[in-house]
Image (cartoon, rainbow, N blue to C red):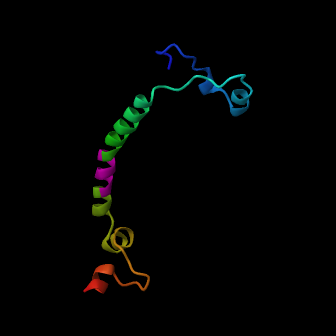
Amino acid sequence: MAVQGKSLAPFFMNFVQIFMLPEPPDIGGPLWVTHLCWIVGTVVLYFPCRWFARVAMEVHPPPVRRMLFERVLPTGALAEEAMA
C-alpha cells in the first residue's frame, strides 16, 4: 500500500473513526493481487497441512484414529463392515 503511495492510516483506525470519515478510505488493490495472494497462501499452506495429517495418522493410536478418520455409522458399526 505504501509502495502505491496510499496512506496506511485506515489500517490503524477503529470502526468509529473509519465510519466518521467523509468518504471511504482508498485501501484496496487490484483484484489480480487478491487472487495471487489467495493462490500463494493456499500453495504455501498445503504442504505443512499435508505433513501434519501424515504425522497425525502415525501418532494417534488405532481407536483414536478410527474415531477421527473413518466413517462410523450411527449404530457404531464401521461403514466398510456394513457394506460387506
Please tell me whether residue 28 belongs to the stretch shown in magenta.
Answer: no
Q: Nearer the viewer, residue 60 or 21?
A: 21
Q: Picture quarter containing residue 30?
A: top left
Please report the bounds of the magenta region as a residue range.
47-53
Residue 18: % across, % down: 69, 28
Q: Main secondary structure of the magenta part?
A: helix
Q: Is residue 20 above or below residue 75?
A: above
Q: Is residue 55 above or below residue 25?
A: below
Q: Residue at x 30, y 62 (%)?
A: 57
Residue extending furthest left?
84
Residue 19: % across, % down: 71, 30
Q: Is residue 50 above or below residue 72?
A: above
Q: Is residue 56 left or right of residue 22?
A: left
Q: Is residue 3 left or right of residue 58?
A: right
Residue extending furthest top?
5
Q: Residue at x 40, y 38 (%)?
A: 38
Residue 8: % across, % down: 57, 20
Q: Residue at x 33, y 80 (%)?
A: 79
Number of numbered discs on residues: 0
Q: Is residue 2 left or right of residue 21?
A: left
Q: Quadrant of the C terminus?
A: bottom left
